[in-house]
Image (cartoon, rainbow, N blue to C red):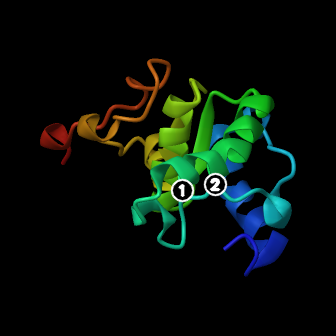
């Protein structure tokens, strides 16, 4: 997506994120948008069986995230989420990885208690939605 649709789609993505978390809370990686680094999990690599090679390829992404100082990395797709989550654990990044939809649902107050697996203690109890009490 980052290469196919370019910076215009990256700007749309950032607009939605800023609305959900507040512009002051967005930490950009460098390089970013269509020049960003690949995490190494896409194109079937996540399921390829070449785990050591996949993690080594992802080292650049892990270092990029750690350099940003961000506590959370928002992933746009499942492969990126799984790869970056594993990179954080493998290389000791200690950052959280969340899906884009998790941030949107959290900001809307509709993220259920059982959907908070990847949130840190700072966000686990924010806007908890209890479906059994909803009308």
Note whether 23 is above or below 51 in the view shown.
above
Residue 26 visible in rendering: no
Quadrant of the rendered image containing residue 76: bottom right
Q: Quadrant of the N terminus?
A: bottom right
Residue 69: where, in percent of width, then height?
75, 26
Which element is circle 1 on? helix
Give the residue number, with chain letter if any, for mark 1. 80
The residue tagged 2 is: 39
Mark 2 lies on a secondary structure that is loop
Residue at x-position 56% and y-position 46% = 55
Mark 1 closeness class: few <14, some 14–19, many ≥20 residues within 10 Å: many
Which residue is found at the position 53% from the left and 73% from the top? 43
- Asked if the residue at tag 1 contacts the one at tag 2, i.e. Cβ–Cβ closer than 8 Å, the answer is yes
Residue projecting furthest to the bottom = 4
The earlier-in-sequence mark between 2 and 1 is 2
Tell me residue 37's x, y (percent): 76, 56
Q: Position of residue 18 (x, y in %)?
A: 71, 47
When the figure is inspected, residue 82 is found, relative to residue 62, above or below; the finding is: below
Residue visible at 48% across and 40% down in the picture: 86
């Amino acid at each position: 997506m980052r290469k196919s649709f370019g910076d215009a789609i990256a700007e749309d993505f950032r607009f939605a994120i800023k609305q959900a978390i507040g512009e002051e809370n967005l930490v950009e990686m460098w390089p970013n948008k269509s020049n960003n680094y690949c995490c190494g999990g896409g194109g079937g690599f996540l399921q390829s069986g070449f785990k050591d090679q996949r993690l080594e390829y992802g080292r650049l992404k892990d270092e990029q995230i750690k350099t940003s100082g961000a506590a959370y990395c928002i992933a746009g797709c499942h492969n990126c989420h799984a790869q970056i989550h594993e990179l954080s654990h493998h290389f000791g990044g200690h950052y959280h990885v969340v899906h884009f939809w998790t941030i949107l649902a959290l900001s809307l107050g509709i993220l259920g208690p059982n959907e908070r697996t990847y949130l840190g203690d700072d966000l686990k109890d924010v806007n908890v939605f209890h479906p059994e009490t909803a009308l």
